[in-house]
Amino acid sequence: MIQAYNPRSFSHSHQRPVKLGKTIEKWFLYLVVLGIAGVSLYWFIIGKGKEFEVNLIAKKGTVEYRENEGAEWKTIENLPLKIKSSSEIRTMADSEASFSITDGSRIKLGSFSRIVLSKNQGEIDWVQTDGNSHHQTAKNAERKSYKVSISDGDFETVGTAFEVKIRDTETVALVLKNQLKASYKDKSTAEAKAGEKIVIDPLGKKVKEIEDQDLKDSWTLANLMDDEKNNLPIEENVLAKAGLREQITDNSQPDDIGSPDGSAQNSQQADNNNENNASKNTNNNINQENAAQSSKITLQAKQSTNGVLLEWGGNQGNWEAWKVLKGGGAELTYPNDSYRTVPKDAKSYLWEMSGDNNTYYFRVCAWSADKGCVGYSNSESLTTSASNTTAETVNENSNANSSVTENQESEGSKKSGVTTRKKCEGSGGHWTETTKVCKCPPKEVFVSSVGRCQKK
């Protein structure tokens, strides 16, 4: 019997496989899209590189921290503290901060320094705006680069020990191990090896040999000694220049042909010995001269109603100005401690400050533009009475201070009311050169009595 044609039955039996095929095709497309997205995400993460953990592990004095430029500054109390990308750290007077990084590197900040952790994934990138930093960078195959960025460019290294010192008039990078590359904003580059320094100042950019005094200031010398203690690498010739090693000289000479007894070699050896002795005698004479000059400078300190009055006397000798130093310890040195510059003919200086029952040390240095400090006075300590209420400012009408040529931490500081460029930048503010004004972060103002930006 012939079955009657049923169009409904025909349509249903042939549409099911078509619908199933479209469903499979749709899920296949979904899987392809998800696969592409997954692969892209994987390569994006791999491309950015490994994230290195940065921790603040030790501090001395007051160290402050904020998570980003718009956040409020907080005084660091508990350690260790994990530092995130975009975080900013600053140190105050007589303060230091030490960091460790999981790539094996270490960094240390000195007083009145400020630095931002710009990046810690794939590479380490610091932005230093002020003060001193000391870096011991480890070689690490997972890290693409290690940089310290400054206003003029970047210093880049792979496994190098170096320091960056930012002053008002110059920036100096000391290379203590291996090499350091500078990439400037004008697209030029420079490289310096261990025992050399990169100097950026108004006269230009140059690579020079490190001088003895670069390594013998209290900040750098203390870092070199710490690195030695912790078995961290420093070039031997750098340690020798710093006075932590004996100078190594090769006095060996080949025997002179035709002199079987080696008389020519012995003669050369004798000449070398004489040369070394002469050098030692010269150094001794220089040290004796400096000691003699230092002994001629006598300093006295006494409290006045406006701060601490410093008076000194002695033969001025061949120098150009006085550096009046203040700090928390007796071994004050220029330019590592707070200082003021006064003219050569000055015999006194009134360091205006509030009485806070703390003990401060003072010292005077006879300063020459060519040689630096050629003689220091004795150190004088004084505990300021809380009865003093005058904030630490500069009174240019004071007889003792009437000829002050420089105010605050380094040369060329510009004054703005009760603050200066150096004090402004060390406090967390931003100096505006055109208006000579210290601009603090949002919702903060500069408070002269404490010398820093604080919340309104």
Image (cartoon, rainbow, N blue to C red):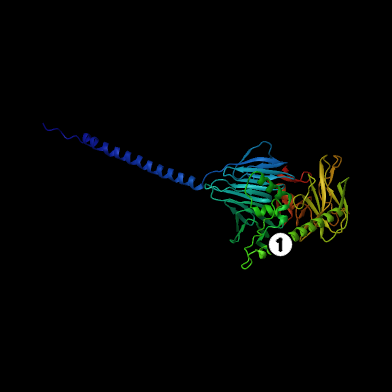
Quick one: 413 or 137, which is closer to the camera?
137
Name the kind of residue labelled 1 in the image.
Ala
Quadrant of the rendering where the N terminus is positioned? top left
Q: Quadrant of residue 83?
A: top right
User: How far across and how far down the image is residue 319, in percent?
Assistant: 82, 60
User: How far across and how far down the image is residue 265, in percent?
Assistant: 66, 63
How many other residues sit within 10 Å of disc 1, few (<14), some (14-19) or many (≥20)? few
Quadrant of the rendering where the C terminus is positioned? top right
Quick one: 428 or 382, which is closer to the camera?
382
* Element marked by disc 1: helix
- Is residue 22 visible from the viewing direction of this image? yes
Q: Quadrant of residue 257?
A: bottom right
Residue at the far left: name it: 1
Quick one: 249 or 38, which is closer to the camera?
249
How many numbered discs? 1
User: How far across and how far down the image is residue 405, in percent?
Assistant: 81, 57
- Is residue 439 visible from the viewing direction of this image? no
- Which residue does the numbered mark 1 point to in the structure image? 270
Q: Residue at x 62, y 42 (%)?
A: 100
Residue at the far bottom: name it: 258
User: How far across and how far down the image is residue 244, in percent?
Assistant: 70, 50
